[in-house]
Image (spheres, rainbow, N blue to C red):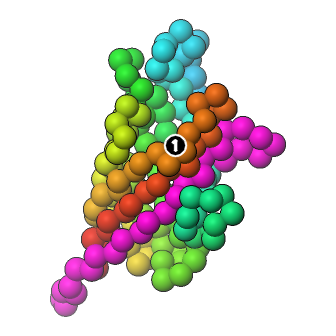
Amino acid sequence: MTRTSLLLSLAIIFSMDAAHGNIPSAIKVVENRNTWKSLTLFGSHMMADDPLTEGPDPNSKLVGWAQGLYGSASQHDISLIMALSFGFVDGDYSGSSVSVLGRKSAASRVREMPVVGGTRVFRLARGYAVAETYWLNVLIGDAIVHYNVTIVHY
């Protein structure tokens, strides 16, 4: 068996999460009858199919899609549990993806979540994703999130 050396890749991307409009990229798929009684919206879950771009401008070059689930996981603060796959459609990573799974506290300016796997170029990936809100409109539920993803892979 031949062992190959570990590689380190960095992906700096922006997720365009839109919960409003004619074709939203994030939609609510689950809530219970008590969700709206909770200040944290505990129990609500969203399905996302968010464009990933090179920059924070929604018209920036598309480099992939953030697809998966996130939901309100706390009755005490606004924290999300997230299971997302960042699938790349451009450049050296085209056709590859990394999976991120973890808790994300909305109260923290910078959030960190683990990379738990990947496909193609990123097989056996591990690492971390640092998320920072670039722009947020709480009235309509739209956000632009800056992700700096550090990926260790073979």
How many marks overall? 1
Quadrant in the rendering for residue 95: bottom right
When the figure is inspected, residue 113 is found, relative to residue 39, above or below; the finding is: below
Q: Which residues are magenta?
A: 1-29
Q: What's the amino acid at mark 1?
A: Leu
When the figure is inspected, residue 5 is found, relative to residue 105, above or below; the finding is: below
Residue 90 in view here: yes
Q: Indicate whether residue 9 is drawn in magenta.
A: yes
Q: Position of residue 147 (x, y in %)?
A: 43, 57
Q: Tell me the crowding category of disc 1: few under 14, some 14 to 19, or many 20 or more residues within 10 angstroms, Cα based.
A: many
74 vs 66, left or right, is left
Query: Which residue is drawn at the image coordinates 77% and 41% (left, top)?
Result: 21
* Quadrant including the N terminus: bottom left
Q: Position of residue 141 (x, y in %)?
A: 62, 34
Query: Which residue is drawn at the image coordinates 60% and 36% (left, top)?
Result: 137
Quadrant in the rendering for residue 20: top right
63 vs 106, left or right, is right
Residue 28 in view here: no
* Quadrant including the C terminus: bottom left
Residue at disc 1, secondary structure: strand
When the figure is inspected, residue 147 is found, relative to residue 102, above or below; the finding is: below
For label 1, the residue is: 69
When the figure is inspected, residue 76 is found, relative to residue 25, above or below; the finding is: above
Query: Which residue is drawn at the image coordinates 57% and 77% (left, top)?
Result: 90
